[in-house]
Image: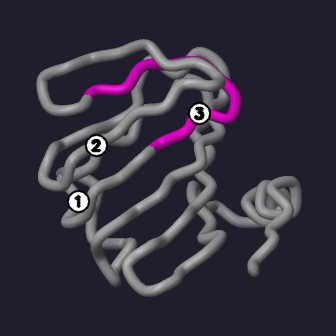
Amino acid sequence: MTKVSTSAVLEQLDETDNQYAEVLAEEALTVEIGRHAAGTAKPKNPHTEDELYYIVSGTGKIRVGDDVHAVTAGDTVFVEQGLEHDFFDIEEELVTLVIFVGSSDPASYSIRE
């Protein structure tokens, strides 16, 4: 069993310039907490694994492939491997729980040029 304090992870993010902090890594499952500041946008390349975002708090939009959706606390977004996706038009800081499934390398993406 693994128990993690979300508030402790968010404090850890406060102490660094990182946008994500790993919470759990077990074989082909990785869980992270992400924080996206209001007014920012971070486009990403496609991942090599499936990904699930749970919006803990905040508001903004997410683009997945050609689809765009508004997101708010309580929403869940599934991103299939290989699809470009990004958060943008972030009105209120987004805090996300991110679950990667199907890869042993959770950092398999990079920021687009």
Q: Residue furthest front?
A: 1
Q: Amino acid at mark 1?
A: His
Q: Magenta stretch?
A: 53-63
Examine the structure image and report whether residue 59 is included in the region drawn in magenta.
yes
Secondary structure at badge 2 equals: strand
Q: Which residue is mark 3?
A: 55
Left/right of residue 13 with respect to residue 90 in the rendered view:
right
Residue drawn at x 78%, y 62% is 9
Residue drawn at x 59%, y 33% is 55
Vertical side of 69 occupied by 27: above or below: below
Secondary structure at badge 3 equals: strand
Crowd band around label 3 with a 10 angstrom C-alpha radius: few (<14), some (14–19), many (20+)? many
**Disc with the residue nearer the chain's start (3 vs 2):** 3
Number of the front mark, 1 or 2: 2
Residue drawn at x 35%, y 15% is 69
Q: Alpha carbon of mark 1 to alpha carbon of mark 2: how far?
A: 9 Å
